[in-house]
Image: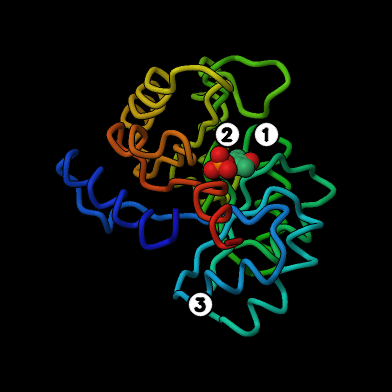
Amino acid sequence: MRLFDVQKEIEIACREAKRDPKSVTLIAVSKSQPIEKISALLDQGHRTFGENRVQEAMEKFPALKEKYPDLRLHMIGQLQTNKVKEAVKIFDCIHTVDREKLAAALSDEMQKQSRTLPCFIQVNTGDEPQKGGIAPRDLEKLLRFCRKETALQIIGLMCIPPAGAIPDLHFALLHKLSREFSLPSLSQGMSADFQTAIRYGATHIRLGTALFNVLEK
Ligand SMILES: *Cc1c(COP(=O)(O)O)cnc(C)c1O
């Protein structure tokens, strides 16, 4: 799909869900994509990107951000505390807060750099041991910690449903949790399931394959 086709698909999904297309932010996931392909999307006017590794983001995005000051970069991968300093420098939003230590480190670093990056808490909706994210039953405690002990601006929840699973239950659970804790934003939905995610209230969808596989032709 091209950017235009993806945007059309988002509009259709929003219409069916009786939602405003403007309430869904499309994050172009550019991990492992070369600068030329990222530039092609920038040329088409797209400005919101996602990367899952700090190192790769630091290699690709400082120059692009200089050229396009309104470019916004989202961190969607697991974050180690020793990478927090660079992460706060290069990213504009963090989707993967999932433990107290990381939350505290991010909060301290943002204060040091005088930068406020809105954050999502990642929830491991499938309880997969190899995956990042807080278990649903521990979410309340982590959220309380973030609100009481840190200056983090937690705007929502994020999930990555287990590979091969039907995503509906995971999206529905995340939606329910976001309501329960009065969090307005929902980062859910990838190339294979973003229409479903929109139906379950996604405000941020993260698309790699659907956007980048075509620019090749
Ligand atoms: C790679 C990645 C995506 C994009 O996946 P596609 O299936 O290529 O759209 C979305 N979210 C996260 C966390 C990712 O790592």
Mark 2 CB lies closer than 8 A to ligand 1: no
| Among numbered discs 2 and 3, the one appearing first in the sequence | 3
Q: Is residue 66 above or below residue 137?
A: below
Q: How many labels does the image show?
A: 3
| Among numbered discs 3 and 1, the one appearing first in the sequence | 3
Q: State if disc 1 and disc 3 touch (CB < 8 Å).
A: no
Closer to viewer: mark 2 or mark 1: 1
Whether residue 185 can be seen here: yes
Identify the element where label 3 is drawn: loop
- Please name the residue shown 39% across and 27% down the image: 171
> Which residue position is annotated with label 2?
145
Identify the element where label 1 is drawn: helix
| Among numbered discs 2 and 1, the one appearing first in the sequence | 1
Q: State if disc 1 and disc 2 touch (CB < 8 Å).
A: yes
- Please name the residue shown 62% across and 85% down the image: 67
> Which residue position is annotated with label 3?
70
Identify the element where label 2 is drawn: helix
Q: In this view, does 192 lie above or below 216?
A: above
Q: What residue type is labelled 2?
A: Phe
